[in-house]
Amino acid sequence: MSAFPQGRIREYIDSLGPAQRTGGLAVIAALARHGAQMAFGIPGTHNLEFYRHLEPLGIRAVTPRHEQGAGYAADGYYQVTGRPGVVITTSGPGLTNAITAAATAYAESRPMVLVSPGMPLGTEGQDMGQLHETKDSSGALSRLLVWSRRVRTAEAAAQAVVDAFEEFGRKRPGPVHIEVPLDVLEGPWLSELPEPAVLPEPVVAPAPVAEAADLLRAARTPMIVAGGGARGAAAELRAVAERLGAPVATTANGKGVLPEDHPLSLGANVRLAAVQDASREADVLLVIGSELADSDLWGGRIGAHPGQSGPRVIRIDIDPDQMHKNLRSDVLLCTDAQAGLRAVLSQLGETTAQSPSDDAGGPAERAASLRQRMAGDFDLDGILPEITRIVQDAAGDDVIIAGDSSQVTYDGTVHALVARGCGQLLYMPGYATLGYGLPAAIGAKLGAPERPVAAIVGDGAAMFAVQEIMTAVELELPVLFLVVDNGGYKEIEAQMDERDIPHIGVRLRRPDFAALGTAMGAHGVALSATAPQWREQLGTAVREALTADGPTVLGLTL
């Protein structure tokens, strides 16, 4: 479980005198025991007893320039490593700065451990005028995250870490917050570490598995829709899709769960009318780990509308509250995606589906026909998708691209990036916050230093987190920060046009992004999409950036 040897954790604890065996040690040792290798945050007056123990216990401290960036970097780190991101803040503003990032993790169902100090026991809500005093930090976060716990002892603080990792493994994942009062953080820890979380094998009810297998075995036009909850079941999903000859469409969070160069892949295109129509034309629809949310469907719908006939729907989801969300289902497997698909696969037996590579009227031809219909719904030849294609062509098939709530992401990278696996697109379609892409790319590069990493964001999004370029400079990370400059908030400007509203607050002045990068110590490159050779220049700049001795800020003016 832990990358840091368990025996070394015990040796370090035993080497400390009573003054250093504190609540801070209890938390950090428990995190190390659960495999934490990196913590994102900013040291502050009240959290230093956490920081004391990070390096000795094998946890690298990464200091962004803003706590919100710490949260987004932790999220990017999780997506490429599978290890929950750890964020350490100080009390008061340090914690509240990180709330948006933690709320993003909640909206996207991603695990995160947020640890902060709090006011001493007995001073809660007393308005005493102490440094960083907050009325009720834990109460505020409990309304936004999976849970927030204000502990009262060092022993409870260590147990809260165990409970967090058990939560991540048994339920729909999401962020949790552990608040350690200052007197507990700096006070004595007299007990031993609690046993780490041990997760039982998922239980899959046999009756719905048999019913699902019967439906799928008899299906003539099955279709699969996979969301972020399917990311841990890529091999099983591929096996089921190939056994059935079923085309697979994914949400943005499920992108790459079936490699997008696979003959049965429809890509992360559930928002397109052709995919939504195909979901109604299917006779059986298998939905895995998705709430089928409007943030992915853009006003459309997967499956039949209420009161209309449509496919039989099989739903696999770890969260029972998801089972009928946005689409009434017929067969429900309440378990994690891997266990559910393995169980279904074991019941399917041999089918008559043709090989997915067959091009003579079989499943591959059906999927190819759907892709042709999709081409009428979305212009992949536009400049925004083209930017992503140029980056991937130059960087390689395994490039990781962090996006943002930018047109170049949702009208470009989501559709144009050909993902060969999960975690190649770092994005947050549900919460749709600005400022995510730059720090998420940093977290991804720290988690996967051997892989090429780029952030492709708009100028509006870049200005929310531009200070994190300094973080990449300090860490000497060869990350490409590609800022597509269209003059402000172009999407909102278009919405104003649709409502006949004058352009207010959307046409904004921007810095020279290349010059700004250079001033921060990064490499700076300025390009214009009006130049005749901009495509070749962009490809060259990408290749140079990913082998540089630090980050590159590339400003591309449209």
Image (tube, rainbow, N blue to C red):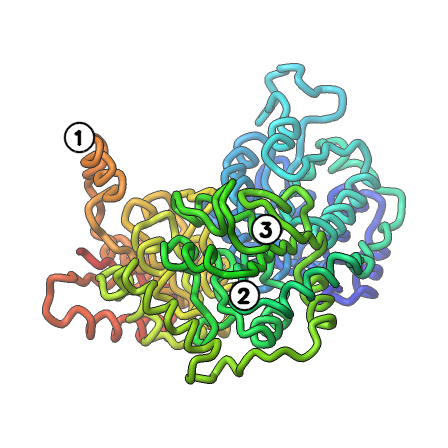
Question: In the rendered image, which quarter contains the N terminus?
Answer: bottom right
Image-based side of 301 in relation to 500, left or right: right
Instruction: Give the image location of residue 331, x and y in percent.
Output: 67, 53
Give the quadrant of residue 34: bottom right
Above or below — where is 373 with respect to 510? below
| Badge 3 or badge 1: first in the primary sequence | 3
SS assignment at label 2:
strand
Instruction: Give the image location of residue 423, x and y in percent.
Output: 51, 63
The CA span between labels 1 and 2 is 44 Å
Give the quadrant of residue 380: bottom left
Above or below — where is 528 with respect to 42? below
Crowd band around label 2 with a 10 angstrom C-alpha radius: few (<14), some (14–19), many (20+): many
The residue depicted at 32 percent of the width and 65 percent of the height is 388
The residue depicted at 23 percent of the width and 66 percent of the height is 381
Instruction: Report if the CB atoms under discs 3 and 2 are less than 8 Å apart.
Output: no
| Residue where numbered disc 2 is placed | 222
Instruction: Report if the CB atoms under discs 3 and 1 are less than 8 Å apart.
Output: no
| Residue where numbered disc 3 is placed | 110
| Residue where numbered disc 1 is placed | 500
Q: Nearer the viewer, residue 541 or 246?
A: 246
Residue type at mark 3?
A: Arg
| Badge 3 or badge 2: first in the primary sequence | 3
Residue type at mark 2?
A: Pro
Give the quadrant of residue 183: top right
SS assignment at label 1:
loop
SS assignment at label 3:
loop
